[in-house]
């Protein structure tokens, strides 16, 4: 096993075909590479490709301060993951965290933490779903529409509340950047009842045949009325009509309510993921 460190986003584009073989599992990494393809002057925080007999088997990519993302291209044994952890620990002892598919992330993060003499904590446990066909929910008052620029401040506020509920780090500046991008791309949707926005959802990280549903939020005083289910179901139906073959969605496993409502409208469990931080 050998490790190759990559210092520019352009070179990472050559790994997109491999990433697309598990398009939903690697949705976040694909999105990171694609979003940086027009910025050749920028460098990823960290990008390491692990190879077995010159065949790439795993990519570790850190594009933000908080953690690195793990993509595994083929089945790896515990011994091979141990070897990868050894190679990584020799060059990088201050990795903040790793997020990715189980069981690979669990094993690699455990071995790395031992090698660099740090504690490993689980920050979030996620379930990743895919949808191919919408199961319409029960009739819910209201209708779906695109979010409007004049509602930007409301969406920024909702974004911060979404992050708080999901135990995700998001600053006001980051929420504003995300909302502005969704609005400009016409990918921020609102469920409206009697003229009042009551729920939102966004479509993000489009890849070859898949697009991700994210930023799903309903204010506390509007919950348990079916708004989120109706909003996500209608957004999903529209995206499938646009030609996407599958939709993906990430949930926090500690929130049984959201996991249940997504399954009711057709989302099926594909895999699980965890984020580990090192302290």
Image: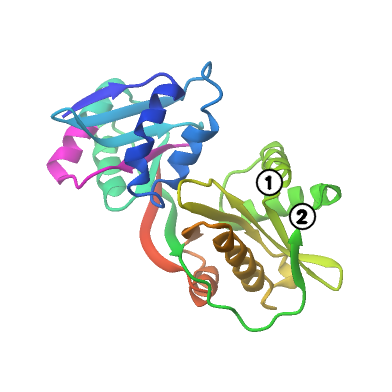
Residue 278 seen:
no
Camera-nearest residue between 64 and 147? 147
Badge 2 crowding class, 10 Å Cα cut-off, few under 14, some 14 to 19, many 20 or more, is: many
- Residue at image position (13%, 29%) is 53
Q: Is residue 193 left or right of residue 220?
A: right
Q: Which mark is residue 182?
A: 1
Residue 229 seen:
yes
- Residue at image position (37%, 58%) is 272
- Kindly give the residue lying farthest to the bottom in the view shown: 138
- Magenta residues span 66-85
Q: Secondary structure at mark 1?
A: helix
Q: Quadrant of the N terminus?
A: top left
Q: Is residue 186 above or below residue 271?
A: above
Q: Quadrant of the C terminus?
A: top left
Badge 1 crowding class, 10 Å Cα cut-off, few under 14, some 14 to 19, many 20 or more, is: some
Q: Percent position (x, y) of residue 88?
A: 27, 28
Spatial separation of the CA atoms under disc 1 and disc 2: 9 Å
Q: Is residue 171 above or below residue 236?
A: above
Q: Which image quadrant is residue 238 in?
A: bottom right
Q: Secondary structure at mark 2?
A: loop
Q: Is residue 275 magenta?
A: no
- Tell whether label 2 touches label 1 (CB within 8 Å): yes
- Residue at image position (43%, 59%) is 128
Camera-nearest residue between 205 and 156? 205
Camera-nearest residue between 144 and 105? 144
Q: Percent position (x, y) of residue 67?
A: 45, 37
Q: Earlier in the sequence, mark 1 or mark 2?
A: 2
Q: Percent position (x, y) of residue 104?
A: 27, 47
Q: Which mark is residue 147?
A: 2
């Amino acid at each position: 096993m050998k490790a190759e460190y990559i210092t520019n986003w352009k070179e990472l584009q050559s790994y997109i075909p491999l990433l697309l073989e598990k398009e939903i599992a690697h949705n976040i990494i694909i999105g990171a590479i694609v979003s940086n393809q027009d910025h050749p002057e920028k460098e990823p925080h960290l990008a390491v490709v692990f190879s077995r007999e010159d065949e790439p088997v795993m990519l570790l990519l850190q594009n933000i301060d908080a953690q690195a993302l793990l993509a595994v291209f083929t089945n790896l044994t515990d011994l091979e993951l141990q070897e990868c952890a050894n190679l990584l620990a020799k060059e990088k002892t201050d990795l903040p965290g790793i997020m990715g598919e189980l069981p690979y992330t669990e094993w690699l993060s455990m071995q790395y933490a031992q090698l660099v003499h740090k504690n490993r904590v689980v920050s979030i446990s996620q379930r990743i779903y895919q949808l191919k066909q919408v199961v319409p929910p029960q009739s819910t008052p209201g209708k779906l529409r695109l979010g409007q620029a004049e509602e930007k401040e409301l969406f920024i506020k909702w974004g911060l509340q979404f992050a708080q509920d999901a135990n995700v780090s998001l600053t006001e500046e980051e929420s504003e950047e995300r909302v502005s991008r969704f609005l400009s791309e016409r990918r921020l949707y609102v469920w409206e009842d009697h003229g009042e926005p009551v729920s939102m959802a966004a479509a993000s990280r489009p890849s070859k045949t898949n697009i991700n549903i994210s930023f799903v939020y309903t204010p506390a005083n509007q919950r348990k009325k079916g708004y989120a289910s109706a909003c996500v179901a209608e957004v999903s139906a529209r995206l499938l009509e646009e030609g996407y073959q599958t939709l993906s969605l990430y949930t926090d496993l500690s929130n049984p309510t959201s996991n249940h409502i997504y399954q009711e409208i057709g989302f099926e469990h594909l895999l699980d993921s965890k984020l580990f931080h090192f302290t």
